[in-house]
């Protein structure tokens, strides 16, 4: 594909759920398990997850189930139960979920480019993000040393700067607004890119339509990653500062 020769150094930050994989409801089950481990009872109200960090999800889950969340002020207070809950549910991931169309092809193509640094920007804590991707053998395509995870902060927007600082430390490369591209499926992914100073390619593979994502301010909106050529054209055009 000739267009890949025109991609300069780029930090590509992938969302996980509904962008790279469909988890088949395992994520919601994991948060419910974490709630039960924390409180000793099952939640009657299920968690709202799309685009949120693990801290936000657990905080909202507690409040929605009439548990005072005031004493929980940092993600470290939830990490133990989140890790244990994922261990209990991880075996269900490949049974109930699947890799989304085009993901393997795009990850493989980008991994062959010397200027492309691929990692993750997700609300999941790092260990659970790795567990989800490893369940589908996708973990080898991304550099977990330079991602932004729910274990790095309580708000998604703050994770863009986290990922950039990690990339600078590891690679000695500075990635700015023009050279940092998020790929996600929710308006909160778009907000994170805008607030964090990055470009955003939105894919309509979650609960939001392409028109909703475009209205939310995505630089580029795709129906999915199935069309590898279209994704790469969009990525190169964003890096060149061209309208897509």
Image (cartoon, rainbow, N blue to C red):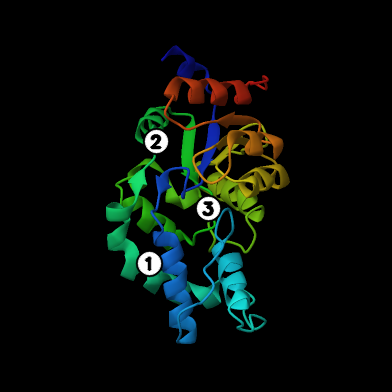
Quarter of the view holding residue 69: bottom right
Which residue is label 1 attached to? 86
Mark linked to residue 186: none
Question: Which residue corresponds to the image point at 43% horizontal and 28% vertical from the top-left?
Answer: 114
Quarter of the view holding residue 62: bottom right
Q: What residue occupies the far front of the structure in this picture?
A: 44
Question: Which residue corresponds to the image point at 46% horizontal and 19% vertical from the top-left?
Answer: 4
Q: Nearer the viewer, residue 79 or 5?
A: 79
Q: Please identify the quadrant where the N terminus is shown.
A: top left
Which residue is label 3 attached to? 122
Q: Residue 27 in the image: state x and y as whole percent.
A: 43, 61
CB of mark 1 within 8 Å of CB of mark 3?
A: no
Residue 88 lies, with reference to residue 66, above or below; the image says above
Identify the secondary structure beneath mark 3.
loop
Q: What residue occupies the far bottom of the structure in this picture?
A: 40
Q: Residue 17 in the image: state x and y as whole percent.
A: 46, 50
> Which is more N-terminal, label 3 or label 1?
1
Which residue is label 2 attached to? 103
Residues at marks 1 and 2, CA–CA distance in whole angstroms: 23 Å
User: Left or right of 240: which side holds 142?
Assistant: left
Q: Residue 243 in the image: state x and y as whole percent.
A: 68, 20
> Which is more N-terminal, label 2 or label 1?
1
Residues at marks 2 and 3, CA–CA distance in whole angstroms: 16 Å
Within 10 Å of disc 1 (Cα), the crowding (few <14, some 14-19, many 20+) is many
Identify the secondary structure beneath mark 1.
helix
User: Left or right of 217: which side holds 26?
Assistant: left
> Which is more N-terminal, label 3 or label 2?
2
Identify the secondary structure beneath mark 2.
helix
Question: Which residue corresponds to the image point at 61% horizontal and 39% vertical from the top-left?
Answer: 174
Residue 135 lies, with reference to residue 6, above or below; the image says below
User: Left or right of 113: which side holds 191?
Assistant: right
């Amino acid at each position: 594909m000739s267009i890949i020769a025109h991609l300069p150094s780029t930090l590509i930050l992938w969302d996980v759920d509904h962008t790279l994989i469909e988890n088949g409801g395992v994520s919601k089950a994991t948060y419910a398990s974490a709630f039960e481990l924390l409180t000793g009872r099952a939640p009657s109200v299920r968690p709202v997850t799309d685009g949120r960090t693990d801290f936000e999800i657990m905080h909202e889950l507690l409040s929605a189930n009439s548990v005072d969340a005031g004493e929980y002020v940092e993600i470290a207070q939830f990490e133990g139960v989140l890790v244990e809950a994922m261990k209990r549910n991880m075996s269900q991931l490949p049974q109930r979920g699947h890799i989304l169309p085009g993901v393997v092809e795009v990850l493989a193509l980008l991994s062959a480019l010397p200027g492309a640094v691929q990692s993750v920007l997700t609300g999941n804590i790092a260990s659970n993000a790795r567990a989800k991707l490893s369940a589908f053998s996708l973990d080898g395509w991304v550099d977990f040393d330079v991602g932004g995870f729910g274990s790095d902060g309580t708000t998604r927007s703050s994770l863009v700067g986290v990922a950039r600082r990690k990339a600078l430390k590891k690679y000695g490369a500075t990635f700015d607004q023009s050279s940092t591209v998020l790929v996600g499926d929710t308006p909160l992914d778009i907000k994170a890119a805008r607030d964090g100073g990055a470009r955003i390619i939105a894919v309509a593979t979650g609960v939001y339509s392409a028109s909703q994502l475009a209205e939310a301010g995505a630089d580029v909106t795709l129906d999915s990653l199935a069309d590898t050529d279209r994704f790469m054209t969009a990525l190169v055009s964003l890096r060149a500062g061209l309208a897509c």
